[in-house]
Amino acid sequence: MRELLNRMHAWMAAYMKSFYSDDAEVQQGILLKEKHTGYVTANCVELAKFLKLPKHDAELAEIIGLFHDVGRFRQYSLYKTFNDADSEDHADLALKVIDELEFFKELAASDYELVKFAIQNHNKMTIAPTDDERKLLFARIIRDADKLDIYRVLEPFLAQENADKLPNFIKGRARPDVSPDFVENFVTGKQADYKKIRTNGDRKIVRLMWIYDINFSWTMQRIVERGYIEKIVANLPMDERIAEGVRRLSRRVEEKL
């Protein structure tokens, strides 16, 4: 499988570079996703080590990390946005790209379906129901690996004074307030729908609510070590209801650690 993985890495590197542009904003977006792909792949490899997965499964996790956002490049080429709500679900686009690649047919049929299931579910609010524990495991790995790096990507823009510096392709409204339904989700521990984001405050709540969907202590430990939660909380418009949500969130973090 390593030889196949080497070919996949070479193809992906060339594919991402094929989207390079003289347009500064387009190039910024492509480079952001190229770097994100590298970090998420590395996170998958590290999670596989933490979970002591056998070599074959660790390589499957690496493949999933490498290709999880392959749809992003076609998405930006077609729609000039990384916003799924304004274009097409990038995980569904990824499956279209993967189905066109002959080297994926070299995987065993069960592994091919597992890879596609994990990638299709890496960005959904919840994982699609399945009785296949292996599919669930790899979906959880990529969801953790992806979220961990998105915290890194968004960290410079968490403070309100930096909200307007968000690139246009990921920018929302810069208002700092949090919509009432997002406050309620935060207090009750329910996932917020990112498609309903209306303010920068809403965006921060969505990122905090991801904590309830972190699957492995390895991931939570890195989130805590890097101070992502504290940085988001410090830039929320605090009131008693949001403080209540923060207390609930803190209990969840301690449980997972």
Image (tube, rainbow, N blue to C red):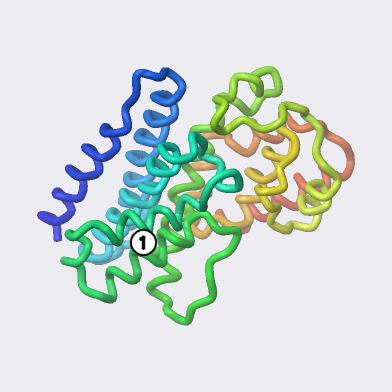
Q: Describe residue 216's horizontal placement relative to residue 44 as left or right.
A: right
Q: Measured from the top left, where is residue 174 in percent x and y?
A: 72, 26
Q: In the figure, residue 74 lies in which quadrant?
A: top left
Q: Measured from the top left, where is residue 162 in percent x and y?
A: 64, 19
Q: Which residue is mark 1?
A: 51
* Residue drawn where x is 61% and y is 51% of the image: 211
Most extreme residue toward the bottom is 131
For this rendering, which residue is in front, 134 or 33? Answer: 33
Q: Measured from the top left, where is residue 243 in percent x and y?
A: 82, 42
Q: Describe residue 48's horizontal placement relative to residue 191 as left or right.
A: left
Q: Measured from the top left, where is residue 45 in percent x and y?
A: 31, 51
* Residue drawn where x is 53% and y is 66% of the image: 127
Q: Quadrant of the N terminus?
A: bottom left
As displayed, is residue 128 above or below residue 38?
below
Amino acid type assigned to the residue bearing label 1 in the image: Leu
* Residue drawn where x is 51% and y is 39% of the image: 82
For label 1, count other residues whose C-alpha is less than 10 Å away and answer few (under 14), some (14-19) or many (20+): few
